[in-house]
Amino acid sequence: MSRPAPNHRADLAALARRAMRERGLLPDFSPAVLAEVAAFRSAIPEGDGHLPDLTGLPWFSVDNDDSRDLDQITVAERLDGGAVRVLVGIADVDVLAGLGSATDGHARENTTSVYTAGGVFTMLPERLSFDLTSLNEGEDRLSMVVELVVSPEGEVTSSTVFRARVRNRARLAYDAVAAWLSGEAPPPEAIGRAPGVEEQVRLQDEVARRLKGVRHEQGALTLQSIEARPVFDGGTLVDLAPERPNRAKELVENLMVAANGATARFLEAKGWPSLRRVVKEPARWGRIVELAAQHGDALPDRPDSRALSAFLERRRAADPLRFPDLSLAVVKLLGPGEYAVERPGEDAPGHFGLAVKDYTHSTAPNRRYPDLITQRLLKAALGGGPSPYTVADLEGLAVHCTKREDDANKVERRMKKSAAALLLSSRVGETFEGVVTGASEKGTWVRVLHPPVEGRVVRGSAGLDVGDRVRVRLLETDVERGYVDFGRAHGS
């Protein structure tokens, strides 16, 4: 008699739910939230038909293949003199998840969607984030639009924000678009169905590269992590596939960074407080200097993003295999991002890693609560009404959102480890090639190359240091706790 196939997906989902509760996050929506959302009949409430109608433009979205919560769409046009006008349409979530509603209460508690190998725990109920407030292909939606004018040199010379009605003409996926732009594959089918979108993608890729060039001149850091996506065959976990940077992801990232900066400047110009996303100058800069010296390079004594950016570019060219591990070390030494309030006339620290001074989160309101807060501030500023938040409110929310982001990150990291332990549970005793990613009094850690899994070296770690190549033998896994334990292999 054959045994039924294991349901790893269900097991990981149960672990994820438990991990969320342990961190104080809500894995389920209350009956009040579900009833509230079930009562909605339209994505566009009555009274909003007067907004500008931009549904005829060739908007498109680019996201992960399996993403259903589409937050942004974009469109662009060439102007005289080589400049380009870019419009970034952002889902109007506030129109259905209003401040003080039951739905808002849940979103305010969790502050973010949580992405795990056991499934996605969305910040908003799926009927909103996957349907009524998602910028789905072929559907009319309300949007906050950020307008940018980008010069031939890549500078944002002017920007503004307004509300409009939009329609996504083509839902595209990162990998397919990147392969096409790189000449490795034909255009995605959705491009062929939507007149004007092929030209749009190429134009926006050009503009994104201009923007990226300016940011890197200013010291934006090139960092590369190895994120592994779980691959299932039915309910069985069969692999962890590495997700690598690609040209389509860079296109979206560079346009969103520009839109977030324009949003922050818009609120500042209106004399309004805002919730900024900041990464301060690294307190452990001295350790980053030491890390550069270990690679035969030199950095100045004081934090300098331009110098660090140049060092990282040199290392990526010299040793692409181990660059993700160097990137991880630098990320940890930079310290986490956080939310902070900028009052009118004050000067927020800015974002060290992106090399931008004015920066907020505004482009993912289906997934992040700070973006929804910013959206409400923008709508109030545009309407000339009072702010929906006092400065004291924003200060409390900044602390809360930072804490909840940390909680969500810990759940996601724990579930990545559990998925890795589950995948390797049948391979105890096998030997793997790896790279040492951490070495301290707390322990020594190694990342094996395939599958891309990190574990602790519990036997034979003496003398190992970060960056060393090493062969290790898998000794034990613990799915419940997310442990993967290695021993140094003979002769390594």
Image (cartoon, helix red, strand yellow):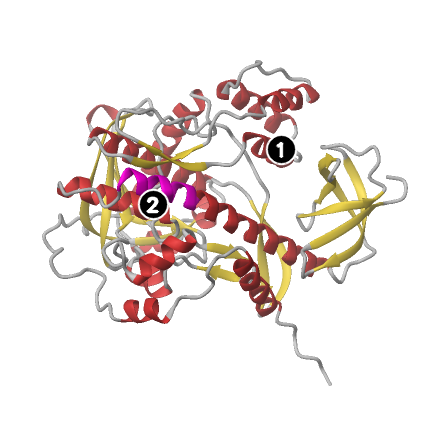
Note whether 86 is above or below 192 in the view shown.
above
Residue 475 screen position, x and y as percent: 81, 54
Quarter of the picture holding the C terminus: top right
Classify mark 1: residues with Cα within 10 Å, few (<14), some (14-19) or many (20+). some
Identified at 63% across, 24% down, the residue is 287
Quarter of the picture holding the N terminus: bottom right
Whether 392 is among the magenta residues is: yes
Magenta portion: prevailing SS class: helix
Residue 271 is left or right of residue 108, and the answer is left
Residue at label 1?
329
Judged from the image, the secondary structure of the residue bearing numbered disc 2 is helix
Picture quadrant where residue 76 is located: top left
Residue at label 2?
371
Identified at 29% across, 38% down, the residue is 391
Residue 460 screen position, x and y as percent: 85, 41
Q: Residue furthest front?
A: 392
Give amino acid for label 1.
Ala
Judged from the image, the secondary structure of the residue bearing numbered disc 1 is helix
Whether 185 is among the magenta residues is: no
**What residue range appears in magenta?**
390-401
Classify mark 2: residues with Cα within 10 Å, few (<14), some (14-19) or many (20+). many
Give amino acid for label 2.
Asp
Picture quadrant where residue 357 is located: top left
**Of 390 and 200, which appears nearest the observer?**
390
The Cα–Cα distance between marks 1 and 2, rounded to whole angstroms, is 28 Å
Residue 422 screen position, x and y as percent: 68, 61
Residue 433 is left or right of residue 19, and the answer is right
